[in-house]
Structure formats: C-alpha cells, structure tokens
Image (cartoon, grey):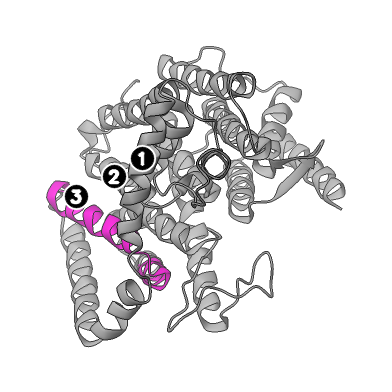
Amino acid sequence: MKELALTIYICLCIFFAITRFSNNKSKTRIVNYFILGTIITSIALKTKIKIKGLEVDFLLLVLFTFIYTFKMFNFKLRKKIPKCIYRLYILLTLSNILIILQIYLINIYSIELLVNALIINLTLQLTIMFLNNYKNYKIALKQVMNSISVFAFFNSCLSIAQFITGKRIIGDLSASLQKAQFTRVEGFAGANNGAGNLAAILFPILLYQLYTKPNRINIINFILNLIFLALTYTRIGYLAVVIQCMIFFALATRKEIRNKYTKRILIIIFTIGSVLSIFNINTIMDALIYERGHTGLTRFIQFKLAFNIFKDHPLIGIGAGQYTYYNLNQLWIKDYAIHSQWLNVLTEQGVLGFFFYASYNLYVLYKLLKKYAKKNLQWFIWMIFVGNFVASNFNPNQYYTVNIYLYNLISISLLVLEYDKEMEGINKNEKNIVY
C-alpha cells in the first residue's frame, strides 16, 4: 500500500513539475503551495517507510523526489553554492561521518536509534539543498510562512479535538491521551512535552503574521495556538513563550498604528489569561505541579548523570541514541531519554559532535541576525531561536522529529529565500542583503 501511495505521489510530483514550464503566476503559486504542503504534511504525519529493516522518514523520500524531479526536467538549479550553505553542508556531513565512525569504534546497543540520528541529519541536508535550489523558481518566503500558519491552524484544531475526545485521533485512533484531573494534548507532535515545544516554535511565526497583518484570520490563528499551548500543560513551553514575549516587547520598535493595535491585542490576551489563571489557580497548580511531581528536580539529577558519562567519554561520546541503553547495560540504571537536546548531543556524540551541532545552530543564528539587521526583524529571529533553545533543553526534543524538521524548515527558509515585498516587511524599498 505504501509503495502504491509513493508511486502515485511521484506521478503527481512529475505532473506538477511540468507546470513549472508555464510562466503563469497562478500556476506557479499552486505548485509552490503543493510542494510546501506536501513537505509540511510529511513532517506532521511522521510517516516511516521500512527499507531493509530500517525505518526511514517519508520526508527524506519526499525531498529526494522533488530534487530528482527538478533535475529530470533539466531545471536550472543553482550551480554556485553560497558559502553559508556550503558550510552548513560540511557541518552536517562531519556530524554524519562521526555517527558512522561510532559504529566501528564503540559498542552500539540500538542501531535503529543511531540510524535515526543519521537520517535526521541527512533530511536536514536535503532540506537545505531543496530550498537553495528551488529559490530560483519564485518560491516566496511569504508562501512558506502561510503554509506553516495553515499547519498551525490544523494543529490547534486537532489539539482541541484531542482535548474533547481524550483520544490521539491521528495514528493509533483508539489510544488515549495522558490523563489525571486533566488531559494533556499532543497535536501533531505526538507527545505532550513535544507539543509544548511545538507551540513555542509556532508562536513567533503566528505573532509575526499578526504583527504585519492584524486581521481576523491571523488573530484567530494566534489565539488558537495559545489555546493549544495551554492544553499541553507543558511548563517549559509556557516559559519559552513568556521569554519570547519579553523579546518581542523589548526589541520590536515599529510605530505604525496597526502595530500598536497588535500590541494592544497581545496585552488584552495576556491580561485575560492572567485573570483566568488567578481564578483557576488551584486547577493550574494541580495540573502543573502537584499531579506532575518533582519532574523538574529529577531532570537536574539526570543532567548531572549525563555530564558524568560525558566526562568518561569526552571525545566521541557513547553513541547517538544510546543513552538509555548505555545506562541499562553499563551502569544498571533505568533512565529515560535525556531531557535536553544540547546535552544529549554532548553526551552521545562527545565534544566533536557537540561542536558540529552547536556550530551549525549558532552559525544559522548569526547569518539570520546579519541578514535581517537592517529590516528591524532581529526580534523575530531571536524569538525563533531562543524559544526553541529553551523548550528543547528541558524536554527530549531530539526524538520529536516534527519540531526538529519544522524549526529547520523555518530557519533555513529565512536564510535561503529572499525577503520579498509581499512579506509586508519593514523598509520595502530596501534591497535584500546578500549573504
């Protein structure tokens, strides 16, 4: 069945690719939204395909199919790779080489989890390659943002349906959500902690849409995402969004009337939220603290254990995805996945892997801040990075592929695609910064 679906999908890709020969703007827009919709749907559904016993993300095949289709139809792909893109390729390639070397140099208890880390890196490389090549075909940054906004809307609707029914709805339809005195929704993230992270990733995108175009659709979508965040009962997700709001109010300086209107909307929303919190403080305390136990303290205990393991294996770590298996087989300790993506990389891939991972993320941040400095949009970049950084370092974000792929799709799109006039940005007459 999956093979048939993949075949139909490839045929559709080819059909829509043919329409690229047309200069019709409406057809171009349809093709762009089809491609972006396919990619984001592949991210949301987390579909896996088994190849020789190993599970591969369907997104990897989606990106490969699009890139191959472009080449098959002799599209004018970019021959010269910008230096920043080339450096990102190199960092991800070095990370992949390290993971492959771990197979031969250390004991690997779960080859599936190691391959999963490798596939994530390969998928990120294909994402960069796809966006870098496809920018020649009039894909607009606005279309990426709009596609993500549509995803956010369906994600919020799904979470509300999950809250009402107490079921996951997607995937295992009969599976129940975590319940005590409250139901923690998951959305497309597939886990309630991951859902809090996802809400923090979507928050700056929806805020940007609201900030630039304060219409009813954007207001509703923004509020729905706040409802989704609230229903996750994820404390670190709440903290990430609070910090993002502080960044927005501190750095966003536009003085147009419509943006004052936007800020008033935000103040009203958070005022209402604060009032509701005061009147429902007992329920909220039960949901976030008493029913949840001292999970925050146990994470710091886990962080100490993980760091001690790193000190014993500082160079290349204990193997990508091997933390829980290493504890069980070497230390006779039963522990859950490290609730910090950055510390997880340090522990499992050592100083070398951490250097590649940190360099990749910080370099993207640096180039984005540089690119958008004169457009007064540094607040937007900082919100995206800081929100993801805070949320991903108190939850096992390394296993939440929806969050990983969506965050990188956003950040790489902002880096690679041109900031077009339709984005309603600041300084419309200003030329795009060459990076």
Q: Where is residue 388 in the image (x, y as percent from the top left)?
A: 36, 47
**Residue 362 belongs to magenta span:** no
Mark 2 lies on a secondary structure that is helix
Left or right of 95 in this view: 199 = left
The label on residue 247 is 3
Mark 3 lies on a secondary structure that is helix
Nearest the viewer among 386 and 85 is: 386
Nearest the viewer among 220 and 122 is: 122
Residue highlighted by disc 2: 386
Q: Find the magenta span and give its range.
A: 223-252
Residue occupying image coordinates x 47% and y 27%: 317
Cα distance in 3D space between marks 2 and 1: 27 Å
Q: Earlier in the sequence, mark 2 or mark 1?
A: 2
The label on residue 421 is 1
Residue lying at the far top of the rendered structure: 80
Q: Earlier in the sequence, mark 3 or mark 2?
A: 3
Left or right of 110 in this view: 121 = left
Left or right of 249 in this view: 428 = right
Badge 3 crowding class, 10 Å Cα cut-off, few under 14, some 14 to 19, many 20 or more, is: some
Is 376 located above or below residue 230 in the figure? above
Cα distance in 3D space between marks 3 and 1: 25 Å
Q: Position of residue 248 (x, y in %)?
A: 20, 52
Q: Which amino acid does label 3 sit on?
A: Ile
Quarter location, residue 31: top right
Q: What residue type is labelled 2?
A: Val
